[in-house]
Amino acid sequence: MKPETKKYQIDKNGYYGEFGGAFIPEMLYANIEELKNNYLEIIDSDGFQIEFQKLLKDYVGRPTPLYFANRLSEKYNTKIYLKREDLCHTGAHKVNNTLGQIILAKKLGKKRIIAETGAGQHGVATATACALMGLECIVYMGEIDIARQAPNVARMKMLGATVIPATSGSKTLKDATNEAIRDWINNPVDTHYIIGSVVGPHPYPDLVAKFQSVISQEIKIQLKEKEGKENPDYMIACVGGGSNAAGAFYHYLDDENVKLIAVEAAGKGADSGESAATSVLGKLGIIHGSKTLLMQTDDGQITEPYSISAGLDYPGVGPMHAHLFESKRAKFIAVTDDEAMQAGLNLTRLEGIIPAIESAHALAALDKIQLNKEDIVVLNLSGRGDKDLSTYIKYFGI
Ligand SMILES: Cc1ncc(COP(=O)(O)O)c(C=O)c1O
């Protein structure tokens, strides 16, 4: 992997601009230090890369296709390509990261894996990696998410994971993350915490971004084959914590002619009080060990987020995205539940692809950008909609 000293990449202290760092309780200090001091050497080693690349190819099914969406392009009178992360084994981009982290955990001698999950895709991807490597797996998941993402809970159990409900706060992703951190504090020696997005204390945001960067690495090659150039005019991705967007943006961060579009969940409307649109509502704060933009009250208490999509229902964004927002390198767009659901149905009926509701938010952003006929748009289709079928069916009365 390339050495990173660029404007939008992490600096040597673990910051993106003013965002990032590691704000952790003393009890986690040793774990985070161990990770920080070893991750670059391990993931850059030949042994690691050979094992990781082999799994990405033969197990995940990479490279995922870059699909020219003909009927969707006609609708918007532009050229739209979909990066098909929905076709990854387990149905979303999350597995790119869990396989990388599990190889890293093995090399650090860890025997027990914990994870948090919102939509259940990261939980499934972690349970899958643990089954593959024969490691114990415990997944924390908010009670509300357990109910709305039932197919993924069943998959995790089938894979041998223990799913523990988080019953505090909004009973969603933030609360599951709190429980996972609590577990790690209690089990510091034998346990590795596989965080599922570009959030958490340094080095997690950088570690996860590096594992997901395969997405834009492939897009560059695939677009060159199809269009004769590596760079699209627009790169669009949804942002929960921001891992699929980090992967899709990574190799374009310093190509300022590529417009980066980050799409957040506005829930019932950014100002409705039921939203997860951090770029609209967030202020500087600390969540899960990272200094970033965060939805909070005047007293600095975290505001409970809301989105119909379990994977975007998070009150912050990772520090890379906070920096991309503040520096205006990326444009942030907030999409409501209704707009996302309609965009999900549109893609299904135009292209025969049922997207995850998270990815449907990115699709809805196409209505909010002024696109020209000659523009080349790449949209990262982060996951497939199987897990969301009951939500779609209930919403549309199908
Ligand atoms: C399909 C899919 N897309 C996007 C996300 C949001 O996560 P991130 O912003 O880390 O890509 C999730 C989270 O669960 C997901 O399952």
Image (cartoon, helix red, strand yellow):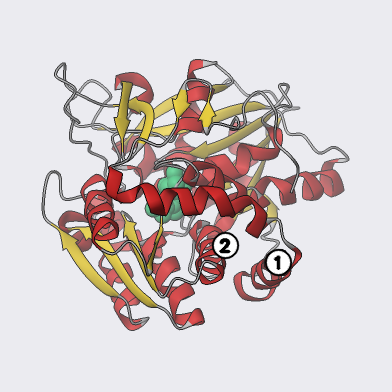
Disc 2 packing (10 Å; few <14; some 14–19; many ≥20): many
Asked which secondary structure carries label 1, the reply is helix
Which residue is label 2 attached to? 100
- Find residue 277 and report its horizontal and vertical position in percent: 33, 28
Asked which secondary structure carries label 2, the reply is helix
Q: Residue furthest left?
A: 168
Question: Does ligand 1 reach within 8 Å of label 1's beta carbon?
Answer: no
Which image quadrant for residue 2?
Answer: top right
| Residue 298 appears left or right of 157 | left
Q: Are marks 1 and 2 in contact (CB under 8 Å)?
A: no
Q: Residue at x 50, y 63 (%)?
A: 98
**Amino acid at pointer 2:** Gly
Q: How many marks?
A: 2
- Quadrant including the C terminus: bottom left
| Residue 216 appears left or right of 76 | right
Image vertical order of residue 321 relative to residue 196, above or below: above
Q: Residue at x 69, y 70 (%)?
A: 57
Picture disc at residue 53 = 1
Q: Earlier in the sequence, mark 1 or mark 2?
A: 1
**Amino acid at pointer 1:** Gln
Q: Residue furthest right?
A: 228
- Find residue 43 and report its horizontal and vertical position in percent: 65, 57
Picture disc at residue 240 = none
